[in-house]
Structure formats: structure tokens, C-alpha cells
Image (tube, grey):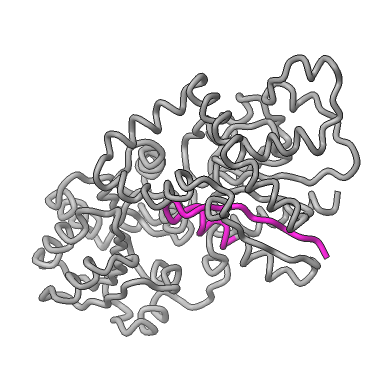
Amino acid sequence: MKRVLILTADAGFGHRSAANAIAATLQKQKSMDIEVKVQNLLNDPKTPSLLRNSQYDYDKLIRESPKLYEFGYESSDKPFPSQLAQIGLSALLFKSFSNEMDEYQPDIIVNTYPLYHPPAQTWYLINEASWTSEEISKFLPQSAISKFSFRGKHIPFITVITDFASVHLLWMSLLPDAYCVATELMRDQVIQNGLSPEKVFCTGIPINPVFSEETRTKAALRVYFGLDPEKTTVLAIGSKRVSNLMENLTVMNHSGFDLQLIMAAGGDEKLYQTMQSTQWNIPVKIVNFTQELPEMMLASDFVVTKAGGLVTSEALAAGLPMILIDVLPGQEEGNACFVQNNGAGIVISDPIKLIETISLWLRNNKAGLKLAAENARRIGRPDSSSHIVKIIQSLLDA
């Protein structure tokens, strides 16, 4: 039996969701004799509390100090600060990474979080590299790794990037045997940073296999959720990171549009209670946290949400046009640009623009909405997780 170790973190939903999607798809492969473990190294007791807490402070930082987050994101995307960060991360996370390797002894590693590259790189240097005196004298992991020949058993390492349009430098390493990226532009960026083209795959961001396996029609799914099968359906996805969702939904509620609304609060109890106590003029279904978000997407006509990598990838896979009301500085700006540039949605700054967009989409027998849905389907990748699993299988079989 082969052991697959999938590394993730809980700094946002995207990394964990991508890891779970890969794990779920792997576990459905009857032809593969495998064991799968999803592990968050930041939660390891050997990880310093500074890093353990960082994934939970992430939410607070982006809510309360978005400009500070933007400064840190952009600063660490420059060569010298990035190198300093990698040295520090290697020192802080090496024990946790090494301990996981010793205890689980994986046959392959799939990484969905950029901060794990530095300790992984150090571990591979120590455990798998056949050193020469010339390489030792350089002592520069990034420049040396491409020259290594591995001794004995090599454990393949795959990196899965969980955003669109841009690759932050902390994602970059010459270590991986394969990179899985969301777009052709990102593939070009990774190749320009030194990785061989045959190792870089445009797979899309891994998403729940439901998106490629669901057989019920949109109308049938609406009936399943207790909604009118014929009425235009809006999905609104919130969380603690979406600050202005209710402001936009309140205006939609009084717009007079013939709509019905599915609202998912994303585990934000305060938002959920506000949704529950609001007097709605249109039919609504309200949930707090749900495992059926893929089905809700497939039941809807468009979505109002933030520009996270995961929700963007899922919406595109569902052919679901997006109205993006919240864009985090840094990686989400790239996600939003990708959606807009491909005609699959729009970024808005106030509720009036929301009403204008809905009005435009619903005119002429929903011509604008249908076009945006076609564009979303064109660039969506509902089979992204299956593609990544095929890469995993090929490296295990090599």
C-alpha cells in the first residue's frame, strides 16, 4: 500500500479545501492501493506558537488591517525578503516536517501551502541529495537543487497552487517533481522561475469531485432545496472575511427583482443570526455552515461572494457567473482580474452597482447572464482533482 501525505493549513478555507478535494478523489480510486493522510504541520506541537497562531490571526489581520496584510504580501514577493522568509521558515518548521516524514513515511507528498517549501527543501537536501564538494561550497539550496542526483528511494513532491493569475515567490521552489497550477499564465510564470516545462501542469485548483459527478439538473437541485425550480436563483456566500454581504443583500431584497436566494453564512454565527432575523421580500433558504455548497452552486444562476481562490474555482466549474463584492489585497486581486478579464463576472464596490449588474444580466431573456455563464464554463475545470490524481498516480508508478 502506498502512503500519500497531503500537506495543508487553515489560513483561509482554500488550502484545506484543496487538500480535502484531492483526498476525496484519491479515496474513490478503486484501482489504487493507497492510504491518504491530510496533515496541517502548523498544528504540530513542535511548530513554534508564532506560526501555529498565524493561521488564526490571518482572519483577524485581513479584517482589521487589510493594508498591513497587503504590505506584508507584496514585500515578501520580492527576491531578498522572500529569501529571508524562506531561511526563517526552514528553521521554524523543519522539526515538524522531519517528524512527520519519520512517523508517516510517505511514498509521495502533495503540498497545498507555500510555507512548507523551505523545510521540505532542507529535508530533501539532508536526506536525499548526493552532494559534491562543489555543491556543498555553494550552499544555496535553490541553485543547488536542480543539480542534485538522488540516492536510493526518492519521495516525489507535488505542489498545488491554490490561487489564479499570479504566483507569489513563496510558492516557488525547484524541489517539486510536479507543479499543478490554475492557468496557462501561471504555468508560464513557474517555468520562467526555472522549473522544467514538462513538470508544470495546468490542472485548475482542486475542487470537490461533486462538481464533475453530480447528475441532477439545476431544476431538480432547486426542488431538493425547497425552492421554485423555474425562478432565477442567487447564491450568496459569506464568512467572517466578507464584511459587506448583508449591505448588498438588503438592497437586493428591496430591488423588486423576481429572484429567490440561497444564503450560506460560512460559519459566521453573527451573520447567520442577521440573515435569520431579516424580513425577506423574496423566497430564501438560509444555512450557516453546510457540506452541500457544491450542490447549491449547481442549483444557482449566479453567486455574490468574495474573490477567494477556492470559491472562484468552484463557481467557474459550476458555470456560475460571479458578482465579487470583496477582494483581498494580494492574491485575490489576481483572482478577480482573471474572472473579469474572461467575462465570467464583475467586481463591484457598492450595492448600486450590484443592482445595475443584475438588471443588465436579466435583460433580453437573461442574455447577459447566459453569456457570463458560458464564459465561466469555458474556463472552469470541474475535473481538476481527477487531473491531479492522475499526476500523483503517474509519479507513484514511475
Query: Magenta segment, which residues?
Result: 1-21
354, above or below 272, in the image = above
Which is nearer the eye, 139 or 238? 139
208, above or below 197, in the image = below
Horizontally, residue 308 falls left or right of residue 381, namely left
Query: How many marks are shown on the rendered structure?
Result: 0
The residue shown at (42%, 46%) is 54
Q: Quadrant of the N terminus?
A: bottom right
> Can see residue 374?
no
> Can see residue 108?
yes
The verdict on residue 6 being magenta is yes
248, above or below 47, in the image = below
Which is nearer the eye, 115 or 359? 115
The residue shown at (40%, 33%) is 73
The residue shown at (49%, 33%) is 168
On the image, the x and y values in percent for residue 162 come to 51, 47
The residue shown at (53%, 50%) is 42
Which is nearer the eye, 317 or 242? 242
Horizontally, residue 89 falls left or right of residue 224, namely right
On the image, the x and y values in percent for residue 31 come to 80, 69
Horizontally, residue 282 falls left or right of residue 49, namely left
Q: Residue furthest right?
A: 152
On the image, the x and y values in percent for residue 209 come to 57, 66
The verdict on residue 272 being magenta is no
385, above or below 227, in the image = above
Q: Looking at the rendering, which quadrant does residue 365 occupy?
A: bottom left
Which is nearer the eye, 43 or 217? 43
On the image, the x and y values in percent for residue 266 come to 34, 65
